[in-house]
């Protein structure tokens, strides 16, 4: 152990992705966090290593959390970043003094009725909702804001 943490569980890197998964009809996939009650969100996740690109992180997190291979759709870098205070309940996952996270935003357009297979350690339920309804359901303001921007990124 070092600083009260097992060496096998390094601190999280405060750089993450937010991936808004949606259909061409603007239905948005939301998943419910396993570690919190009624915390609906899009796919999120931190880099595994400093040299992992945000696009690599997005592809990995989408697969890990939903079982969706990004190759089944179109992954788009929205070239947006959110910088926010890490929720106090999750600060222990980061190194000493780390209080803010930088989140890079992507969209992933997939065919309607794309199958979803959740990682049960991370999420307990999923649902497809019309984009405005999905934004209302999100617990995270930055996630809701990204969903509300979705129509701007449809090509």
Image (cartoon, rainbow, N blue to C red):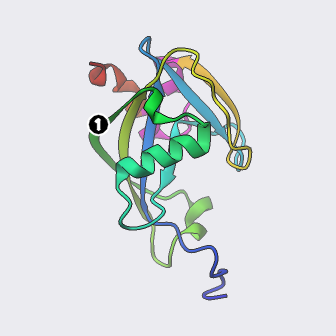
Residue 5's place in the image compared with 137, above or below, is below
Q: Residue at x 59, y 20 (%)?
A: 128
Report whether 148 appears left or right of 91: left
* Quadrant where the C terminus is found in the figure: top left
The total of numbered circles placed on residues is 1
* Residue 108 place in picture, x, y as percent: 42, 30
Residue labelled with disc 1: 78
| 1 lies above or below 126 | below
Is 132 magenta? The answer is yes
Q: Quadrant of the N terminus?
A: bottom right
Q: Which residue occupies 51% across, 51% down?
A: 45
Above or below, 133 relative to 98? above
Q: Residue at x 66, y 84 (%)?
A: 4
- Percent x, y for residue 138? 54, 33
Does the stretch in magenta take in 127? no
Compared with residue 111, is residue 135 higher up or lower down, i.e. above or below? below
Q: Specify few, some or many for label 1: CA neighbours under 10 Å numbering under 14, 14-19, or 20 or more.
A: some
Q: Position of residue 76 (x, y in %)?
A: 32, 33
Q: Looking at the image, which is closer to me, 84 or 46?
A: 46
Instruction: Examine the residues drawn in magenta and state their main secondary structure.
Output: helix
Query: What SS does tag 1 mark?
Result: strand
- Residue 22 lies, in percent from the top left, at 46, 23
Q: Quadrant of residue 146?
A: top left
Report the residue that reaches farthest toward the front: 71
Q: Which residues are magenta?
A: 130-144
């Amino acid at each position: 152990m070092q600083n009260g943490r097992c060496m096998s569980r390094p601190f999280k890197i405060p750089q993450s992705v937010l991936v808004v998964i949606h259909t061409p009809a603007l239905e948005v996939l939301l998943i419910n966090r396993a570690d919190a009650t009624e915390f609906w969100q899009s796919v999120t996740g931190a880099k595994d290593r400093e040299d992992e690109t945000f696009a690599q992180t997005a592809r990995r997190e989408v697969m890990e959390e939903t079982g969706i291979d990004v190759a089944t759709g179109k992954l788009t870098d929205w070239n947006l970043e959110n910088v926010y205070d890490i929720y106090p309940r999750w600060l222990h996952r980061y190194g000493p003094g780390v209080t803010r996270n930088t989140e890079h935003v992507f969209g992933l357009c997939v065919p309607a009725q794309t199958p979803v297979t959740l990682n049960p350690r991370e999420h307990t339920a999923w649902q497809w909702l019309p984009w405005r309804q999905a934004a209302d359901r999100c617990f995270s303001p930055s996630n809701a804001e990204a969903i509300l921007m979705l129509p701007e990124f449809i090509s």
